[in-house]
C-alpha cells in the first residue's frame, strides 16, 4: 500500500504534540506515550511508518544532529553557581556511579543473558547514560529540592557524552584486534581532546558574536543552531562520536557567561528540543520489529531489575558518602535514573553496525537497551512524584504566593493566606515597607526581584503564583516576564496599568501579564479603597449562603480576589471566569459603606479637579468618586454579574 509521506510526516509532528500534551495533563514523562505511539505506528503495530526505509542513509545523521541540539539546549542550563553545593556528589556519580553502572551492567548481561564479555561491556556502557530528555520533564513535574534538582540535571547532561565515549571505546575495541588495547585508549583520549577543544572554540565564537551583537535578533537563534550542528559534524568527522562532547562543552561555556540574551536563546532551544524529542522517540520506537521484541524473555527483565534495584542505589550510596544530602534525598536519587534518547540512538547505531560486521549476537543489544529505557522511564518516571512526596523531597503542587510590593492590600492578603497555611513571601525595594510586613509576621525580602543576587537567594519553595502589585506598571510587567520562566505564564499576574490620560501612552498589551481581579483594578484605585477602610476577608460559600447571596449582601462595596476550592486556590481575573460553588472559600476586599460614603464626600472635589480628561466608564460601570466606586460593584468583572 502506498503511503502519503507528507501526511505521515505531518502526522508524526501532530501526534508528538498530542503525546506531550497528554503527558503534561497526566503529569507523566512524555517518553511513555511517545514510545507507545511509535511502537503502534511501526512494524510492531500497524506498520504505518518504516523510518529506516523512508529516510534511508539519512536516518542516523538526522537522529545524531537532533540529539546534538537537545544536548546543547540542556547544557545551556548548567551554571556553575547551581552546582556549588552538590559538585562533589555530581563528580562522584560521573566517576564511581558510571563505573558501577558500566561493570555492573556488563556482569548482569554476561551472567544472566549469556552474552560474551565484549558485548556485555558495550551494553554496560550504553546504559550508563540518563539524559536531559527524560530528566527535565521529571524535574518539571516533581519539583524536588534544590539539591536533588542540581544533581540530576548536571548528571543527566554530563553523563550523556561520557556514556557515548565509553560506548565508542568498547565498540572500537570489539571491531579492532583484541591486542590493540593501546590504540583504543589513544582513540578515547583523541575524542576527549578534539571534542573539548572544538567545544571551547565554538563556545567562545558564539560568545563573541552575541557579546558584540554581530547577529541581528531575527538571525541570532539561527546562527547558534548553525554553529551547533557544524561543531557537532566537524568534531564527529575528526573523531567518531566526539560531537556530543563538543556541543556539551559549547553549551556549558555559554551558560557561564553573563550574556543578557541567554534566557531568550534557551527559551527558543527548549521549544525546539521538545519538537525534536517528540519526533525522535516516535521514529526510534517505530524502528522496532516484532522479531526484536520477541527476543526479550524473563532473563531480560531480571537484568532490568538489577539495573533498577542494585546498580543505581549502590552508585548513589557510594557517590554521596560525606555529602550534605539528607537520607531521603539520597533515597530519591537512588530511585531516579531513567535512560533517554542517547542510549536509544547509540544502541541502534552500534547494533546495526555490529550485525553487518558479522556479530549476530549483537541483535539482542537494541531490544535489551530499549527494555531498560522503557522500564526505567515507566517505573521510575511514572512513580517519581509519588515517591518524592512520600519522602518529603518535593513541592506537592505549590500553591503559595510571591507578592512584589509591600502595600496595605498585599500585607492584608498575605497575612490571611499565611493563616490558611499557604506560603507567602513579599519582596520590596523599600525597607520601611518590608519592615511593616515583617512586624505582621509575614516573610519579606528586601531587594529588587530582578537583580541577580535576589534571584540566587530567593527561596521559591512552595511558591506557585506571582502577583506584581507595585505602583510602577513597567516594573510589574518586567518582573512578570522574568517570573514566567519559573512559574509559567498562567500563574503570573499584574495589576492593570494606570488609566490612559491625554497625551500619555500606556504599555502595549503584549507586554502585560494576566490582569489581576479586574481590568480597572489599578494600583491607585485599590489604594484608595484600602485608605477608605477596605479589608481583606474570607467567606465560606455554602448551599444556603451562595455566591449570589454574597453578592446581594455586598452589592457595591466588594472586590472579589481569590477562590479556594478542593484545596486549590485560583486568582480571579477578567480574562477567565471562575465559578464559586458551594464548599468554596471566597477571598474579597470589602469596604464599609459608611466609610465609603465618608471618603466619597471628602475626596469628591479633589477627584474632580484631578480628572481633567476622564475616561468614559465601560459598560456595566457607573463610577462614584475618584477611586472608581460603582453601584453594581467597584471592580467586579462584568461576566460575574450574570451569576
Image (cartoon, grey):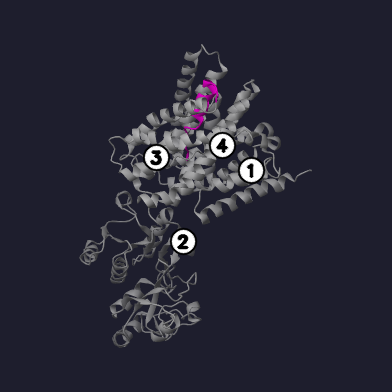
Instruction: State the residue position of label 1.
Output: 39
The magenta region covers 114-131
**For the residues bearing labels 2 and 4, Cβ distance under 8 angstroms:** no
Q: In this view, does 466 lie above or below 369?
A: below
Mark 4 or mark 3: which comes first in sequence?
3
- In the image, residue 397 lies at what x, y percent? 41, 58
What is the CA distance from the residue labelled 3 to the residue labelled 2?
33 Å
Instruction: State the residue position of label 4.
Output: 370
- In the image, residue 297 lies at what x, y percent? 58, 34
Mark 1 or mark 3: which comes first in sequence?
1
Judge whether residue 115 is colored magenta: yes
Mark 4 or mark 1: which comes first in sequence?
1
What is the CA distance from the residue labelled 4 to the residue labelled 3?
21 Å
Q: Which of marks 2 and 4 is in front?
A: 4
Few, some or many C-alpha atoms within 10 Å of disc 1 (few <14, some 14-19, many ≥20)? many
**Looking at the rendering, in which quadrant would you find the N terminus?**
top right
Instruction: State the residue position of label 3.
Output: 334
In the picture as drawn, the residue positioned furthest to the right comes out as: 1
Q: What element carries label 4?
A: helix
Instruction: State the residue position of label 2.
Output: 490
Q: In this view, does 223 lie above or below 576?
A: above
What is the CA distance from the residue labelled 2 to the residue labelled 1?
34 Å
Is residue 464 visible in the rendered structure shown here?
A: yes
Q: Is mark 1 on a helix, strand or loop?
A: helix
Q: Which of marks 3 and 2 is in front?
A: 3
Q: In this view, does 315 lie above or below 506?
A: above
Of residues 622 and 368, the one nearer the viewer is 368
Amino acid at each position: 500500500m502506498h503511503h502519503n509521506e507528507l501526511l505521515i510526516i505531518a502526522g508524526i509532528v501532530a501526534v508528538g504534540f498530542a503525546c506531550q500534551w497528554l503527558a503534561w495533563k497526566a503529569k507523566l514523562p512524555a517518553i511513555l506515550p511517545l514510545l507507545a505511539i511509535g511502537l503502534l505506528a511501526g512494524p510492531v503495530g500497524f506498520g504505518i511508518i518504516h523510518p529506516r526505509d523512508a529516510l534511508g542513509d539519512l536516518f542516523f545523521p538526522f537522529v545524531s544532529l537532533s540529539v546534538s541540539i537537545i544536548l546543547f539546549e540542556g547544557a545551556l542550563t548548567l551554571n556553575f553557581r547551581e552546582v556549588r553545593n552538590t559538585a562533589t556528589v555530581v563528580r562522584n556519580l560521573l566517576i564511581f556511579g558510571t563505573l558501577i553502572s558500566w561493570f555492573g551492567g556488563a556482569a548482569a548481561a554476561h551472567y544472566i543473558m549469556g552474552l560474551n564479555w565484549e558485548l556485555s561491556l558495550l551494553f554496560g556502557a550504553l546504559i550508563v547514560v540518563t539524559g536531559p530528555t527524560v530528566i527535565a520533564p521529571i524535574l518539571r513535574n516533581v519539583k524536588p529540592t534544590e539539591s536533588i534538582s542540581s544533581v540530576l540535571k548536571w548528571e543527566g547532561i554530563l553523563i550523556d557524552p561520557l556514556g557515548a565515549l565509553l560506548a565508542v571505546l568498547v565498540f572500537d575495541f570489539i571491531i579492532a584486534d583484541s591486542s590493540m588495547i593501546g590504540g583504543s585508549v589513544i582513540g578515547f583520549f583523541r575524542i576527549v581532546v578534539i571534542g573539548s577543544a572544538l567545544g571551547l572554540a565554538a563556545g567562545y565564537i558564539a560568545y563573541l558574536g552575541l557579546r558584540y551583537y554581530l547577529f541581528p535578533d531575527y538571525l541570532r537563534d539561527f546562527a547558534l543552531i548553525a554553529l551547533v550542528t557544524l561543531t557537532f559534524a566537524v568534531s564527529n568527522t575528526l573523531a567518531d562520536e566526539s560531537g556530543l562532547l563538543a556541543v556539551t562543552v559549547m553549551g556549558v561555556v555559554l551558560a557561564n557567561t553573563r550574556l543578557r540574551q541567554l534566557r531568550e536563546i534557551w527559551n527558543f532551544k527548549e521549544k525546539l528540543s521538545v519538537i525534536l524529542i517528540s519526533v525522535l522517540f516516535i521514529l526510534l520506537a517505530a524502528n522496532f520489529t516484532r522479531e526484536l521484541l520477541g527476543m526479550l524473555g524473563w532473563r531480560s527483565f531480571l537484568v532490568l531489575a538489577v539495573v533498577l534495584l542494585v546498580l543505581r542505589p549502590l552508585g548513589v550510596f557510594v557517590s554521596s558518602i560525606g555529602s550534605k544530602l539528607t537520607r531521603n534525598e539520597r533515597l530519591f536519587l537512588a530511585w531516579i535514573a531513567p535512560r533517554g534518547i542517547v542510549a536509544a540512538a547509540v544502541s541502534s547505531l552500534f547494533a546495526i553496525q555490529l550485525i553487518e560486521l558479522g556479530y549476530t549476537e549483537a541483535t539482542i543489544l537494541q531490544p535489551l537497551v530499549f527494555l531498560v529505557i522503557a522500564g526505567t522511564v515507566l517505573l521510575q518516571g511514572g512513580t517519581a512524584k509519588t515517591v518524592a512526596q512520600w519522602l518529603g523531597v518535593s513541592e506537592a503542587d505549590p500553591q503559595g504566593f510571591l507578592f512584589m510590593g509591600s502595600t496595605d492590600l498585599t500585607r492584608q492578603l498575605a497575612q490571611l493566606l499565611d493563616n490558611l497555611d499557604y506560603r507567602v513571601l513579599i519582596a520590596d525595594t523599600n525597607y520601611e515597607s518590608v519592615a511593616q510586613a515583617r512586624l505582621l509576621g509575614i516573610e519579606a525580602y528586601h531587594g529588587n526581584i530582578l537583580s541577580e543576587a535576589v534571584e540566587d537567594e530567593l527561596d521559591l519553595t512552595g511558591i506557585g503564583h506571582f502577583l506584581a502589585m507595585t505602583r510602577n506598571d513597567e516594573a510589574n510587567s518586567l518582573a512578570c516576564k522574568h517570573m514566567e520562566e519559573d512559574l509559567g505564564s498562567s500563574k503570573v499576574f499584574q495589576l492593570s496599568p494606570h488609566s490612559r490620560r491625554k497625551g500619555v501612552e500606556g504599555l502595549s498589551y503584549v507586554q502585560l501579564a494576566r490582569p489581576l481581579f479586574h481590568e480597572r483594578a489599578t494600583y491607585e484605585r485599590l489604594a484608595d479603597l484600602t485608605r477608605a477602610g477596605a479589608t481583606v476577608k474570607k467567606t465560606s460559600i455554602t448551599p444556603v449562603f451562595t455566591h449570589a447571596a454574597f453578592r446581594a449582601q455586598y452589592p457595591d462595596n466588594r472586590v472579589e480576589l481569590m477562590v479556594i476550592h478542593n484545596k486549590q486556590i485560583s486568582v480571579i481575573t477578567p480574562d477567565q471566569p471562575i465559578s464559586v460553588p458551594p464548599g468554596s472559600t471566597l477571598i474579597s476586599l470589602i469596604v464599609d459603606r459608611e466609610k465609603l460614603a465618608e471618603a466619597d464626600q471628602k475626596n469628591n472635589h479633589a477627584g474632580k479637579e484631578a480628572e481633567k480628561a476622564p475616561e468614559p466608564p465601560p459598560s456595566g460601570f457607573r463610577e462614584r468618586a475618584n477611586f472608581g466606586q460603582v453601584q453594581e460593584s467597584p471592580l467586579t468583572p462584568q461576566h460575574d454579574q450574570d451569576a
